């Protein structure tokens, strides 16, 4: 298998004139988040969450701005944002349906639910519907093995999931 190489060192980052990391965000992070951590790097994940909550995803420009605020290398921000599946480095739909595919969920039938949602929405995992309403994700573990199968829909975890239950959620969010 050949490695695909991308020209990261010479890639242009799309920019807008106004920053993603606003002065208000920096003030909030300085007062509320930074004091909870021994090092500035320790605050990276909560700051990534805050940025994603504010903008819906974490843009390359925002990653550079976060790195400057935390006084760390931009590569550390990129590595963290791309390692954890909970962070979005591309635009996502208004609603994100993330179905757990851990071993417990697999044993309890997550594949039938995932296949049903794929068919109903007409998208595969990591795709967004053409109307921008839904993004489907398949995640490794939501930490709810005792209530498998489960899914995270936006910020709400749905346990003991069935096809009928996920249909109810999709119907509610479609209106």
Image: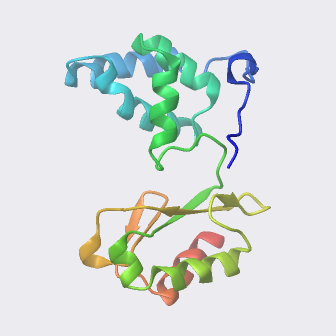
| Left-right relation of 64 to 140 | right
Q: Position of residue 148 (x, y in %)?
A: 33, 78
Residue placed most toward the observer, 165 or 100: 100
| Left-right relation of 20 to 121 | left
Question: What residue is shown at x 44% (from left), y 85% (from top)?
Answer: 109
Residue placed most toward the observer, 76 or 48: 76
Question: What residue is shown at x 31% (from left), y 17% (from top)?
Answer: 40
Q: Is residue 175 visible?
A: no
Q: Vertical placement of 29 versus 159: above or below?
A: above
Q: Is residue 153 visible?
A: yes
Q: Position of residue 33 (x, y in %)?
A: 29, 25
Q: Position of residue 113 (x, y in %)?
A: 52, 82
In the displayed image of the protein, which residue is found farthest to the right? 130
Question: What residue is shown at x 37% (from left), y 85% (from top)?
Answer: 108
The quarter in which the C terminus is drawn is bottom right
Which quadrant of the figure has residue 133? Answer: bottom right
Q: Vertical placement of 76 versus 138: above or below?
A: above
Q: Vertical placement of 88 versus 112: above or below?
A: above
How many numbered circles are shown? 0
Question: What residue is shown at x 37% (from left), y 83% (from top)?
Answer: 107
Q: Position of residue 163 (x, y in %)?
A: 51, 87
Residue placed most toward the observer, 106 or 30: 106
């Amino acid at each position: 298998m050949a490695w695909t190489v991308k020209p990261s060192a010479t890639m242009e980052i799309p920019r807008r004139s106004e920053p993603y990391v606003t002065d208000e965000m920096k003030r909030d992070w300085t007062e509320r988040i930074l004091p909870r951590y021994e090092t500035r790097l320790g605050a990276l994940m909560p700051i990534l969450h805050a940025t994603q909550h504010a903008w819906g995803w974490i843009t390359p420009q925002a990653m550079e701005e976060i790195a400057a605020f935390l006084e760390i290398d931009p590569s550390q921000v990129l590595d963290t944002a791309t390692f954890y599946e909970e962070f979005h480095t591309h635009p996502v739909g208004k609603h994100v349906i993330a179905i757990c595919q851990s071993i417990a969920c697999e044993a309890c039938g997550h594949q039938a639910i995932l296949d049903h949602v794929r068919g109903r929405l007409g998208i595969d995992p990591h795709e967004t519907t053409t109307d921008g309403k839904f993004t489907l994700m398949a995640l490794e573990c939501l930490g709810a093995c005792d209530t498998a199968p489960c899914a995270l829909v936006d910020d709400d975890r749905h346990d003991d999931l069935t096809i009928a239950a996920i249909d109810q959620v999709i119907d509610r969010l479609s209106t």
